[in-house]
Image: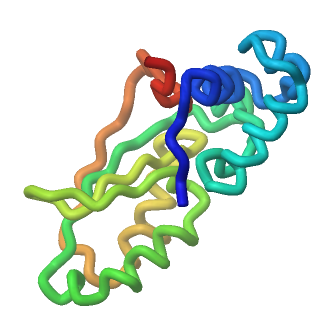
Amino acid sequence: MQSELDSYDRKILALLQEDASLSSAQIAEQVGLSQSPCWRRIQRMKEEGIIRGQVTLLDRKKIGLNTQIFAEVKLNAHGRSNFTEFTEAIRGFPEVLECYVLMGAVDFLLRIVTADIEAYERFFFEKLSMVPGIQEVNSIVALSEIKSTTSLPVVR
């Protein structure tokens, strides 16, 4: 059972989203709690699945992933019956960072990163277009990034 988040929980989550390397003592000081209750709150939110994990965020361009593509994927009628096969294939592609099921003219939206357009072309022809059931893929190249965040708006 998930408990209601109070203002302390929300402040803790906001801080952790910005810097997950903060100690519980540092977080406690910033939110106005002592260390033990702060630590217990963090543990509870981990147990409840509110905090799903802690990761290190990388700058994709500094590691050579300069191209970001958004691909709209439409499945054919037969492909829709193989939804599980499609989603498993997509989960197996490290180039695909995100995949969403959509309502409307297309079935899925993928966010894909590659080194360059040529690398995307190889990914498209050697992997993505080989997935059974795909009728159409519309690829959109992102020219620049205006905003990118992993932080959810938890503080009200």
Query: What is the quadrant of the N terminus in the image?
Result: bottom right
Measured as percent of width and height from the top left, residue 101 is found at 29, 61
Residue at 89% from the left image edge and 25% from the top image edge: 35
Residue 17 left/right relative to 84: right
The answer to whether 71 is drawn above or below residue 79 in the figure is above
Residue at 86% from the left image edge and 27% from the top image edge: 24
Residue at 84% from the left image edge and 24% from the top image edge: 22
Residue at 21% from the left image edge and 81% from the top image edge: 80
18 or 24: nearer the eye?
24
Task: Tell which residue pokes out farthest to the left in this image.
Answer: 105
55 or 8: nearer the eye?
8
What is the total number of numbered labels drawn onto the structure image? 0
Residue 86 left/right relative to 155: left
Residue 53 left/right relative to 80: right
| Residue 98 appears in view | yes
Q: Which of the 4 image quadrants contains residue 75?
A: bottom left
The answer to whether 2 is drawn above or below residue 147 in the figure is below
Residue 8 left/right relative to 100: right
9 or 106: nearer the eye?
9
Measured as percent of width and height from the top left, residue 51 is found at 65, 45
